[in-house]
Image (cartoon, rainbow, N blue to C red):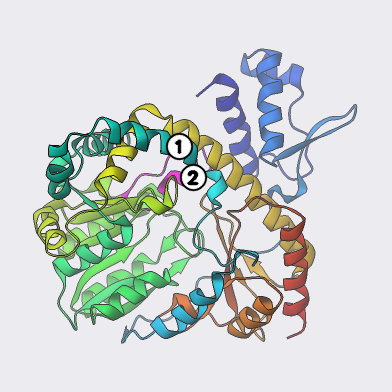
């Protein structure tokens, strides 16, 4: 990272934490140069970068100021409090009816599960694909199917090592996206009828997996900023024969919540005490906005209880369908289950991603992606404050590309979804994120697409529809 990028991140952290408040003047170029020991040109470059990220703006002959939308005036949702209960899962029809209506490319994609493909280095990935295929031997086409591309396994192990997780490439199982990894993990540790502790709200695909495997959900509340409620989870583990826990410890979908390092340690201590495996869905971990990447619960794992799942779908290459799991003590069982089903994700796609990780500048791409997403988050928060009722609540995630909105109680988000769709606007209504179809006045909106006049107009239309309830 260049010096001006590092300095920009330091100022951005001051804005995120409220040390520099909306409307407040940031240090002048001369003062910042003298105080931080950097050149004026470094300060200028940093401030230009912060302008591009939507965090500050220049006023003629006055200096630079924190943008008003850097911190949204809308309040944060409150955690729901209720004792966890076992629930049969039956949400697929509802989910499919929602997802099936999101395919029109002319629809404003607030309901999408992916960021804009224009934010990904697809041309550079294509060169890596051509390069890797050109040098692939006929033997590798077959041998890499079962064990995975050796170079990709090495690159993944190196990234784990940099994040403080020491593991052997033998623990890694390459899968067809993170969803296959999560499916395999559940199959490795459960049988039909078993109880699985999940988050509430939870990513709707979580519910679909439980439904397909005939598992029962134990919904654990999630705080919109701090993550899963450990007290409720501890009570549930003590009362119920839970066979596995499944959660997102960082940038949870749909809330965007991230557990602190202390809470992640406590979560690991809890599952270790009960000897219940944890499936850690960590697909958004690379999309943090701060200067320090979040630690995973896997980084505290000493007993192999954590199955850490991720993929490149949200950060680099959605269509390549390459994910993985660091399976701990369950790695061999997961690998065998994979060989009994899909055998292998695309061998050329694995080789292309391995080449890109080694030569393509993945970390440089991630920095650019994070900056774009942070600017787009600010635009959506500012637009929501302009157009939505003042009683609306919204999350303030420190990364990712989703906001969770809690509207006034009379708003029916399923009806809102239909009315918005008729106006060419998609969203993800709250009930698809719950086994019990809760969160009826909530919705998830995606800010992962470049903000433009169409986005702003869509928010204005949504505000009018919400106000009509």
Is the residue 348 above or below the residue 258 in the image? above
Q: Is residue 291 magenta?
A: yes
> For numbered disc 2, what is the local secondary structure?
loop
Which image quadrant for residue 56? Answer: top right
Q: Is residue 287 above or below residue 270?
A: above
| Residue 398 appears in the figure | no
- In the rendered image, which quarter is residue 141 located in? top left
Q: Quadrant of the C terminus?
A: bottom right
User: In this rendering, is residue 326 above or below 432?
Assistant: above
Which residue is more in the foreground, 182 or 140?
140
The residue closer to the viewer here, 150 or 407, is: 150
Report the residue at 45% width, 37% height from top. Answer: 292
Residue visible at 42% across and 40% down? 293
Pick the residue in front: 199 or 354. 354
Q: Are marks 1 and 2 in contact (CB under 8 Å)?
A: yes
- In the rendering, which numbered label is found on residue 292? 1
Residue 107 lies left or right of residue 245; in this view the side is: right
Q: Which mark is residue 288?
A: 2
Q: Residue at x 43, y 81 (%)?
A: 82
| Residue 206's disc number | none
- Position in image of residue 254 (x %, y %): 49, 65
User: Label 1 vs label 2: CA separation?
Assistant: 8 Å
Crowd band around label 1 with a 10 angstrom C-alpha radius: few (<14), some (14–19), many (20+):
few
Q: Is residue 249 magenta?
A: no
How crowded pointer 2 is (Cα within 10 Å; few <14, some 14-19, many 20+) is rated as many
Left/right placement of residue 382 relative to residue 269 reads right
The spot of residue 439 in percent (x, y) is: 52, 79
Label 1 residue SS: loop
Q: Position of residue 381 (x, y in %)?
A: 68, 57
State which region is magenta.
Answer: 283-296
């Amino acid at each position: 990272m260049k010096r001006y990028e590092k300095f920009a991140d330091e100022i951005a952290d001051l804005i995120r934490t409220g040390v520099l408040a909306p409307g407040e003047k940031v240090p002048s170029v001369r003062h910042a140069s003298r105080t931080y020991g950097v050149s004026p040109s470094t300060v200028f470059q940093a401030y230009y970068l912060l302008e591009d990220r939507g965090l500050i703006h220049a006023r003629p002959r006055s200096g630079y100021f924190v943008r008003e939308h850097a911190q949204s005036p809308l309040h944060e949702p409150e955690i729901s409090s209720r004792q966890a209960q076992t629930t049969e899962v039956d949400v697929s029809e509802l989910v499919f009816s929602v997802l099936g209506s999101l395919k029109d490319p002319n629809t404003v994609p607030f309901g999408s599960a992916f960021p804009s493909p224009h934010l990904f280095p697809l041309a550079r990935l294509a060169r890596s694909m051509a390069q890797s295929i050109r040098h692939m031997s006929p033997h590798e086409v077959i041998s890499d199917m079962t064990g995975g591309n050796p170079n990709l396994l090495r690159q993944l192990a190196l990234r784990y090592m940099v994040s403080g997780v020491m593991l052997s490439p033998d623990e890694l199982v390459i899968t067809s996206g993170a969803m296959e990894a999560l499916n395999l993990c559940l199959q490795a540790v459960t049988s039909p009828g078993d109880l699985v502790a999940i988050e509430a709200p939870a990513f709707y695909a979580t519910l679909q997996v439980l439904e397909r495997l005939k598992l029962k959900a134990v919904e654990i509340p999630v705080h919109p900023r701090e993550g899963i409620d450990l007290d409720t989870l501890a009570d549930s583990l003590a009362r119920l024969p839970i066979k596995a826990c499944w959660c997102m410890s960082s940038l949870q979908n749909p809330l965007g919540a991230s557990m602190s390092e202390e809470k992640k340690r406590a979560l690991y201590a809890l599952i270790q005490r009960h000897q219940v495996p944890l499936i850690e869905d960590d697909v958004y971990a690379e999309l943090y906005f701060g200067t320090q990447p979040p630690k995973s619960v896997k980084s505290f794992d000493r007993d192999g209880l954590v199955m850490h799942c991720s993929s490149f779908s949200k950060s680099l290459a959605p269509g390549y369908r390459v994910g993985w799991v660091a399976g701990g003590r369950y790695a061999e069982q997961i690998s065998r289950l994979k060989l009994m089903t899909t055998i292998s994700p695309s061998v050329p796609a694995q080789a292309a991603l391995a080449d890109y990780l080694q030569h393509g500048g993945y970390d440089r791409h991630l920095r650019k992606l994070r900056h774009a997403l942070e600017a787009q988050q600010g635009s959506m928060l500012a637009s929501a404050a302009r157009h939505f009722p003042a009683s609306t609540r919204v999350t303030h995630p420190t990364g990712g590309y989703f906001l969770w909105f809690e509207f006034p109680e009379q708003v029916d988000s399923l009806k809102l979804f239909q009315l918005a769709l008729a106006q060419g606007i998609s969203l993800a209504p709250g009930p698809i994120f719950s086994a019990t179809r809760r969160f009826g006045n909530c919705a998830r909106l995606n800010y992962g697409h470049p903000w433009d006049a169409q986005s702003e107009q869509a928010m204005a239309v949504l505000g009018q529809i919400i106000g009509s309830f």
